[in-house]
Image (cartoon, rainbow, N blue to C red):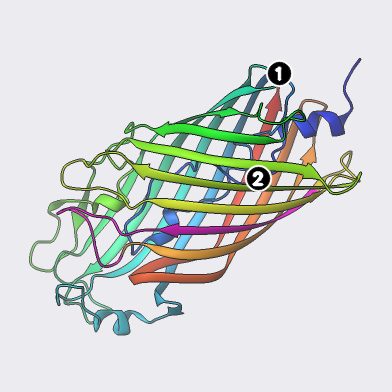
């Protein structure tokens, strides 16, 4: 029997944001780069065997300086110091464009595996340290990078209960992205020189990270579904004097299934805690944060096996360490196919 659009969408449209995100972690002053909680397709939370694929685009424009829970101006940021008493680096912006290929295979009612392969385009500019908040100074540079990021592979087991709606996650982030990209100096004392990009702004971290988590999903009624997920990502090693901070996520979501032939509206609450980066090459002052996001969106069926979706994620609470760049919103759009 040919499945209905709502049945197919249940198979290919997830109930949760990314268990594994497309991006690598980003230096504190670019705090949103690691929290693209927009990989809605990572898990279909389905017991239907088969292969699913999606291609997603995420846009994150980090152009708001923050310290703690408040936004600040560039001149104010220039007056702050690091934990060592040194002048604070003042970032201008970090514009991120992510294209992520997601491949998911469900072997049977108990087992499945998901792969995420990101391509990252990032334009970053900083005024460096000892700046007045408007003119470039020590260590200022611009960079434009376009390359593959760090790949993630996550397996899932959902045979813990008879209805297969409680699952465990275990996976790994591999160091497939470069961590040696360079930019162009805008420092008045050495303009045009080739300089290394901050480690947190590289396409990859250089580390191998463990990913663990658990999830639960169910129906409230005939038309309403909900989910909850808890995940953690932890670097198991350091690379060239750099180790990214551990990340912890708690996501809750609700979707309406009464009009799946037209669309499937969803709303999600996403929380994140990230610890400081460590190592001689890390920014140990302006890394780490606690954040809460509200994320409305919808999935629209195109055929019985394909759909498109879009989401907008808006921060409702942010507490960043040091001085960091954040985004006012994250926008995502994608196409999904079930085979």
Q: Residue at x 20, y 77 (%)?
A: 131
Q: Earlier in the sequence, mark 2 or mark 1?
A: 2
Compared to residue 101, the image places residue 216 above or below, namely: below
- Seen as rendered, the residue at the extreme left is 189
Residue 213 position, x and y percent, is 53, 41
Name the mark on residue 49. Answer: 1
Residue 117 position, x and y percent, is 47, 32
Tag 2 secondary structure: loop
Compared to residue 37, the image places residue 92 above or below, namely: below
Q: Nearer the viewer, residue 22 or 10?
A: 10
- Seen as rendered, the residue at the extreme front is 161
Residue 31 position, x and y percent, is 40, 61
Q: Residue at x 64, y 57 (%)?
A: 312
Mark 2 and mark 1: Cα distance apart in space: 19 Å
Q: Quadrant of the C terminus?
A: top right
Name the mark on residue 16. Answer: 2
Region rendered in magenta: 265-286
């Amino acid at each position: 029997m040919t499945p209905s659009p709502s049945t197919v969408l249940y198979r290919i449209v997830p109930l949760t944001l990314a268990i594994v995100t497309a991006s690598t972690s980003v230096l504190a002053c670019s705090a949103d780069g690691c929290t693209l909680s927009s990989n809605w397709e990572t898990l279909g939370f389905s017991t239907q065997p088969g292969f699913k694929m999606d291609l997603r685009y995420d846009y994150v424009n980090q152009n708001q300086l923050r310290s703690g829970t408040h936004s600040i101006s560039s001149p104010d940021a220039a007056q702050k110091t690091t934990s060592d008493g040194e002048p604070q680096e003042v970032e201008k912006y970090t514009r991120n464009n992510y294209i992520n290929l997601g491949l998911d295979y469900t072997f049977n009612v108990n087992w499945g595996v998901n792969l995420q392969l990101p391509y990252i385009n990032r334009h970053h500019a900083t005024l460096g340290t000892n700046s007045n908040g408007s003119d470039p100074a020590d260590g200022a540079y611009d960079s434009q990078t376009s390359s593959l990021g760090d790949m993630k592979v996550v397996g899932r087991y959902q045979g813990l209960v008879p209805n297969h709606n409680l699952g465990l996650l275990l996976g790994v982030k591999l160091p497939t992205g470069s961590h040696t990209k360079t930019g162009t100096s805008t420092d008045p004392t050495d303009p045009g020189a080739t300089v290394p990009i901050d480690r947190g702004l590289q396409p990859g971290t250089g580390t191998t990270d463990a990913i663990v988590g658990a999830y639960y999903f169910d129906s409230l009624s005939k038309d309403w579904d909900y989910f909850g997920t808890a995940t953690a990502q932890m670097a198991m090693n350091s690379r060239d004097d750099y180790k990214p901070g551990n990340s912890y996520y708690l996501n809750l979501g609700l979707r309406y299934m009464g009009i799946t032939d037209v669309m499937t509206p969803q709303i999600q609450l996403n929380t994140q805690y990230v610890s400081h980066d460590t190592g001689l090459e890390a920014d140990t002052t302006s890394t780490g944060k606690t954040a809460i996001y509200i994320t409305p969106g919808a999935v629209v069926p195109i055929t019985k096996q394909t759909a498109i979706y879009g989401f907008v994620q808006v921060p409702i609470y942010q507490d960043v360490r040091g001085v960091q760049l954040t985004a006012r919103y994250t926008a995502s759009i994608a196409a999904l196919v079930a085979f």
